[in-house]
Image: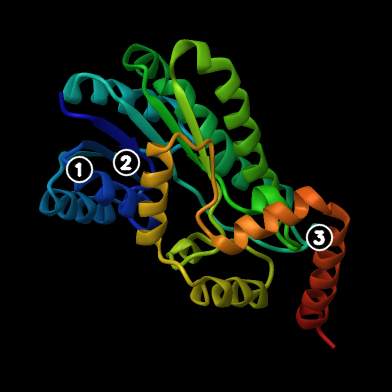
Amino acid sequence: MQKRMMITGAGSGLGREIALRWAREGWQLALSDVNDAGLAETLKLVREAGGDGFTQRCDVRDYSQLTALAQACEEKLGGIDVIVNNAGVASGGFFEELSLEDWDWQIAINLMGVVKGCKAFLPLLLRSQGKIVNIASMAALMQGPAMSNYNVAKAGVVALSESLLIELQAQQVGVHVVCPSFFQTNLLDSFRGPTPAMKQAVGKLLESSPISAREIAEYIYTAIEQGEFMILPHEQGRMAWALKQKNPQLLYSEMASMAGKMRSKTTPV
């Protein structure tokens, strides 16, 4: 029987690369995004890679759109085997600069979008004894400066994934959480922050990444096959996480130092 996967945020970046990696294995893919043109391009590439499927516009903030997507998977694919909650947006700024609206926007998409995706698709996953793959970030584990709302949202995704791992084990539903560091992507298209300098700083980190979205998708594929729960695709990320577990205070001091340097660069003279 052909395997079936649903991906949110599939119109570009990591979502598209995940779709292509599984397409090469002949999977049927339910591709969703708010970017219609990007979705159409992803489906075209999926078919060229050996997969097939359908596209459906979906804003993960709207639970009714996610339940409609689940229903479409039932009708068109006969169910679902894996869901990838990948849709996300970027933001940055020191805590005092971030508005409560910035917080609401970030939590609504990056955390509640994942909660709603899991909720909408769980009945199908229980039936297929499938898998949940939640895309978090190293920001969930390292809490870098000037991105508190992003850090909190992504940390929530890790906590949700840990909770589901424990709760769903007896029901044979697998759970994985992916924590990539910065990588070459179009995440900046959605960036919200109080200063242009903050966006430029994030842009430099994205450009300097030694690993591409395609390589991350390949790493995720292998790690899921091996049954890993917490998937850390970047070597530097794995080293940083090991350091934090061993000596958290050292890491906090390093981050505080980084925050000081960032403030001196973004503060007008």
C-alpha separation, residue under disc 3 versus residue under disc 1: 40 Å
Task: Determine whether label 2 and label 3 are within 8 Å by CB.
Answer: no
From the image, state whether disc 1 or disc 2 is nearer to you: 1
Q: Name the residue tied to disc 2.
A: 32
18 left or right of 241?
A: left
Q: Name the residue tied to disc 1.
A: 25
Labels 1 and 2: the sequence-earlier one: 1
Q: Position of residue 148 (x, y in %)?
A: 73, 53
Q: Amino acid at mark 3?
A: Leu
Q: How many marks?
A: 3
Q: Amino acid at mark 2?
A: Ser
Labels 2 and 3: the sequence-earlier one: 2
Q: Residue at x 62, y 41 (%)?
A: 107
Residue 45 vs 201, above or below: the answer is above
Rendered image quadrant of residue 158: top right
Q: Name the residue tied to disc 3.
A: 251
